Amino acid sequence: MFQVSREFAPPFSLISPYFTAGSIFYMIAMLLLPMLGVDMTTYDITLVAWAHLFLLGFVMMIIFGAMAQLVPVVLEVGHFSVDFYYLIWPLLAVGTVLMGAGFAVFPSILPYGGIMVLVSMLIFLADTALTLRKVERVSLTVKTVAVTNAFLLLGILVGFAMALTIGAGAGIDIQKWLTAHIVLVLGGFVTLTIVGMSMVLLPMFGLSHGFDETPVKRAFKMMSIGVAVYFVGALFNSESLRFLSLLAVFAGTALYLWQIWLIYRTRARKESDIWFRSMAVGYASLAFALILAPIALIGHLESLAIAAVWFLVMGFFIFLINGHLFKIIPFLVWFERYSPLVGKEKVPMLADMVPKKSGEFQFWFTAVGMAVGGAGLLFGSDELFKGGAAFMAVGSIYMFISVKWMMNFGKSQMQEKK
Amino acid sequence: MSEKITKERVFDAIRKVIDPEVGFNLVEMGLIYDAIIDDDNNVKVVMTLSTRGCPLHQLLMQWVKDAVKEIPGVGEVEVEIVWEPEWNISMAEDHVKKALGGA
């Protein structure tokens, strides 16, 4: 029988540094965003430095923190050793800073940052792999976790080889491997992890039942095959394989969006809270990215491809992650501080533990900034891009305030009682 | 000999257990399927959860058990989670459906 006991649930003190560090990296990355411009290219070193600060410090940090909590929920077994998570975040945080500085200013420190990030991710992968061995009921989410972790391993090994090339002169063809690294990590790990987790979290929070899961099963296969074939295409330098693999990824994404529509249609909980609106903006951004990406691919339009990645990363990733933080953090705080008091005194509901004002400001500044910044990329307007980036920077400050507010909820009362 | 405990009394006791995510108690959510009470007032509660991945799984079971144990004269209390029939919003009471927007 499925059991998530208290001993399976990691302590809040273990998970909270991930959310604190993640929201700080998010704020720093967004404050630095106006440094970029519409003339950026995939190989622009400022963009590469910024992307690592944002993706490692924010996206990966939050995903790893969330996985510490969600692995027992979605895999239906306890972690092999949740104590590994005490090591992951400091290594990832320091490694991210070194990598960002290495790309931007001091190439010689890049391999040191790279090795710290690599070790942090290998620890994460080791715990997940050993946890997967205990799983009894192999659901779609379990398969997703297994496949995404394999892609992450490949992606970080390719990335580390490139870091060695930039910092220590190893002989890797960076132009050849950079897109493989991006597709493996962003497509193979981040996107597919979100696909897998969303199949648990969206029905759970929306109380959706009785929907057909065929689209997501097909989407998962197509996207996984697409990412794997892209890697083979990079290995053999085959343009046609890469082209076909991206088409498979796009088709898989379309099926996934269809699945989300089915979940949306069967939801019983219809309130439009910050989580729901974040999901709506996130999936609308993904749909828009999906319209832009095939045009960019077929027309060989790099600026359009960058705009598609913008809507994927700044729209889909940010809104899916931030939206879920407004559910996950209150739950963890409630579980830690209030669940022992149930039946003994009145305890708050989770909805009471969400900051209304800062949450709203965060949502609107980020949504407007994402749309305006994306328009700037599409129309080649640096003013629009930087204006959007400034809005997103303000949104990130409100996100940080919201995270701190949620994490401190009830803390002073608890200390007074002690 | 203590008074025979009724199913209604068990359900009333469980009404004190609130799901903190939605703010409704487990009975009005339709999550409590049955309460089987034998001649010695031993109670077996048969319930489900709104989702298999519910992270409050064990706590909810414990809260249900604690709530039923507060009934005077109750014997052993057992809580069993079942997944058939799968819960859906039609099992909830009307005011819950209305509040959630599903009515």
Image (cartoon, rainbow, N blue to C red):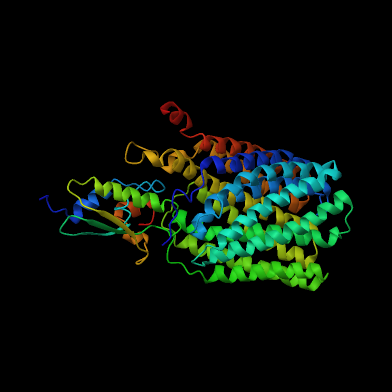
Q: Residue at coordinates 45% horizontally, 41% vertically from top-left?
A: A334
Residue B92 in the image: state x and y as whole percent: 32, 57
Relative to B68, say whether B38 is above or below: below
Left-right relation of A96 to B57: right
Q: Position of residue A97 (x, y in %)?
A: 74, 41
Residue A159, horizontal then vertical, whole percent: 77, 56
Q: Quadrant of residue A148?
A: bottom right
Can residue A416 be seen by looking at this rendering? Answer: yes
User: What count of labels does the image hold?
Assistant: 0
Judge by depth and name the residue closer to the eye, A118 or A140. A118
**Can you tell which quarter of the image residue B87 is in?**
bottom left
Quarter of the image that includes the N terminus of chain A: bottom left
Q: In the rendered view, would you say A183 is above or below A357?
A: below
Q: Nearer the viewer, residue B95 or A163?
A: A163
Q: Is residue B91 above or below residue A101?
A: below
Instruction: Report the side of A23 relative to B79 (left or right).
Output: right
Which is nearer the eye, A128 or A375?
A: A128
Residue that protrudes farthest toward the left in the picture: B1
Corner quadrant of residue A20? top right
Taking A307 as reference, is A196 left or right? Answer: left
**Where is the C terminus of chain A found, in terms of image quarters?**
top left
Q: Residue at x 74, y 68 (%)?
A: A230
Residue B66 in percent (x, y) is at 29, 47
Observer able to see residue A47: no
